[in-house]
């Protein structure tokens, strides 16, 4: 699937992870909230260099009473998709795919590590993500590790600067399932600017 929406400027500077405080309006948030019918789950998303395997960005999809993506210092932005300080709200299957596709290209792929957790663990992760606030650039893995280490069953995880090192720790959680998503889009995407239509799903 190719990215069918927006691309910000020159090849995505994943490691730079520009961030600033964002607070979507209440009406958009309430309209777009999404409850996924799958089990409570944490999914670590790591964007990795195709050649070296080095990580460039970390994010955490949380499925609790609502599904969000904690995208610390991330660059995924669209006016139809509400965000509150690095929490992307209303992560339907459509938005999930757009997010993963946006970060995947000929030079980067997305490593997807998911683990089912008790509902109380997912709810605590959601609470911590909303409370964390906007994350400074280059701190995506550190911030994600700080959230994870506060969760039952994830206490052994230590905040690290490098996304691939966080992914290696997450892989030690019992029951983790891992897969990869790849695309062949060119990094030379500065001229791509297409609109998408986002429909709320209940």
Image: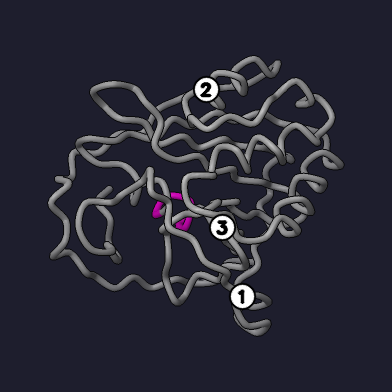
Magenta region: 94-98
- The image quarter containing residue 53 is top left
Q: Is residue 191 magenta?
A: no
Closer to viewer: mark 1 or mark 3? 1
Q: Measure the C-alpha gap from mark 1 to mark 2.
A: 30 Å
Q: Secondary structure at mark 3?
A: loop
Q: Residues within 10 Å of mark 1 (few under 14, many from 20)?
A: some
- Residue 83's place in the image compared with 130, above or below, is below
Numbered tag placed on residue 23 in the rendering: 1
Residue topped by disc 2: 165
Q: Position of residue 54 (x, y in %)?
A: 36, 25
Q: Count how many numbered circles sit on residues in the image.
A: 3
Q: Measure the C-alpha gap from mark 1 to mark 3.
A: 17 Å
* Magenta stretch, overall SS: helix
Q: Position of residue 81 (x, y in %)?
A: 50, 70
Q: Is residue 18 left or right of residue 9?
A: right
Q: Secondary structure at mark 1?
A: loop
Q: Secondary structure at mark 2?
A: helix
Query: In which quadrant will I find the C terminus?
Result: bottom right
Q: Residues within 10 Å of mark 2 (few under 14, many from 20)?
A: some
Numbered tag placed on residue 91 in the rendering: 3
What's the residue at 39%, 54% (across, down)? 98
Upstream in the sequence, badge 1 or badge 2? 1
Upstream in the sequence, badge 2 or badge 3? 3
Numbered tag placed on residue 107 in the rendering: none
What's the residue at 68%, 49% (across, down)? 37
What's the residue at 57%, 60% (across, down)? 88
- The image quarter containing residue 10 is bottom left
Q: Position of residue 63 (x, y in %)?
A: 68, 47
Q: Which one is in front, 46 or 67? A: 46
What's the residue at 29%, 73% (across, down)? 195
Q: Is residue 177 left or right of residue 17?
A: right
């Amino acid at each position: 699937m190719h990215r069918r929406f927006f691309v910000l400027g020159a090849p995505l500077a994943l490691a730079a992870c520009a961030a600033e405080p964002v607070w979507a309006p209440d009406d958009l948030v309430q309209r777009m909230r999404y409850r996924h019918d799958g089990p409570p789950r944490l999914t670590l998303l790591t964007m990795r260099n195709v050649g070296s395997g080095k990580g460039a960005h970390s994010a955490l999809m949380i499925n609790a009473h609502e599904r969000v993506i904690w995208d610390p210092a991330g660059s995924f932005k669209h006016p139809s998709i509400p965000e509150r300080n690095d929490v992307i709200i209303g992560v339907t299957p459509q938005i999930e795919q757009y997010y993963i596709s946006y970060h995947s290209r000929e030079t980067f792929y997305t490593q997807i590590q998911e683990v089912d957790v008790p509902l109380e663990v997912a709810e605590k992760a959601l609470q911590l993500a909303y409370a964390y606030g906007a994350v400074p650039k280059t701190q995506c893995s550190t911030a994600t590790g700080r959230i994870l280490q506060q969760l039952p069953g994830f206490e052994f995880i230590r905040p690290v600067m490098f996304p691939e090192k966080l992914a290696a720790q997450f892989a030690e959680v019992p029951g983790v399932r891992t897969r990869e998503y790849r695309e062949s889009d060119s990094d030379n995407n500065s001229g791509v600017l297409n609109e998408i239509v986002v429909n709320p799903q209940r």
